[in-house]
Amino acid sequence: MVVDLSLGKILLLAGADAVNPCALAVLALVLIAILTASRRKINVLKAGFAFTLSVYVLYFLYALIIIGFFKGMHLLFSQVSIYLFKALGAFAMIIGLFNIKDAIWYKAGGFMTEMPLFMRPKLKRLISRIISPSGAFLIGIFVTLFLLPCTIGPLFVASGILSTIDLLAAVPWLLLYNVVFVSPMIAITFIIFLGYSTVEQVGGWKEKNIRYLHLIAGLILFGLGIGMIMGWL
C-alpha cells in the first residue's frame, strides 16, 4: 500500500519543524560562542553555515534510519501499512496538542516540544568550546542528539509517510524537507552577518515570541493530523 504522498504534507511537516524554538535557540548559542571567540563577522557566516550543514546531514541520516525501521515493520507485518497513515496522523495531532498547550500554558522544557531542562547545561558547555567554523560543524554533529527530543516528531511522521515508497524515491523528498527545516537557520545567519540584527536581539525575539512559535507549529501539526485521519489529505 502506498499512502497519498503530496508536496503539501511534506512542506507542512517541515514548516512545523522549522519554527520549533528549540533549534533556533541552539543556533543562537553557537553564534554567540563564535562571536566570543572571534569578533569577525565572516566567521559568523561560516559558523552558521557549517552548523546548519551538519544539522542538515545528520537529520537526513536520522530520517533514513526511521524509514528503514518502518520498512522493516512493513515486511514483518503485512497489514501495517493499512493503519500506518492514520496512526501517523494521530501522532501528529498529539504533538500538535503539546505545542498548543505550550502556547497557552508555557513552561520551559515542554515534553516533545522543547529540549529537556536537564540537557541544557550539558549543551551549553559543549557549544562553549566552539572557536572556529570547523568546530561549529563538528559540534553540530553532537548537538543534533540534544535536538532530537524536541524536533523528532514532525520528522518521524514525514519519515513514516515516505517509508511507503521506494527508498531512492524518498531521497528527494527528504532533501526538500531538510531544506525547509534549516531555512530559518540560514536566514538568521544572514541577518546577523549583514548587520540587520544581533545574536542577542534574535535570542530576545525568540523568547518574546516563543508562545506564538509553539502555536503555529501546534496548529499545523494538529490540522495535518486531522486531515490525514479523515482522509482529506
Image: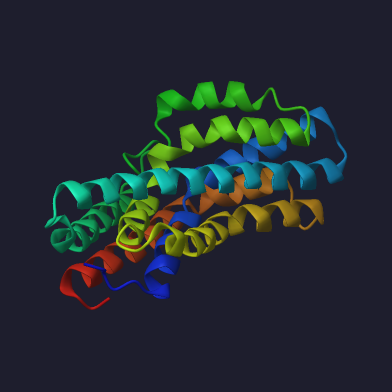
Residue most extreme to the left: 79
Give percent across and percent down for residue 140. 61, 35
Give percent across and percent down for residue 224. 30, 67
Kindly indicate the quadrant of the structure image that contains residue 87.
bottom left
Q: Number of numbered discs present?
A: 0
Q: Is residue 51 left or right of residue 180?
A: right
Kindly indicate the quadrant of the structure image that contains residue 164.
bottom left
Q: Quadrant of the N terminus?
A: bottom left
Q: Is residue 177 left or right of residue 76?
A: right
Model colouring: rainbow
Q: Residue at x 32, y 55 (%)?
A: 157
Toward the viewer: 232 or 100? 232
Give percent across and percent down for residue 54. 62, 42
Give percent across and percent down for residue 219. 33, 64
Q: Residue at x 75, y 34 (%)?
A: 134
Residue most extreme to the bottom: 232
Q: Residue at x 61, y 45 (%)?
A: 203
Toward the viewer: 168 or 4? 168
Q: Residue at x 40, y 42 (%)?
A: 150
Residue most extreme to the right: 40
Q: Quadrant of the C terminus?
A: bottom left
Q: Is residue 89 visible?
A: yes
Q: Is residue 151 visible?
A: no
Q: Image height check: is 119 above or below 58?
A: above
Toward the viewer: 29 or 8? 8
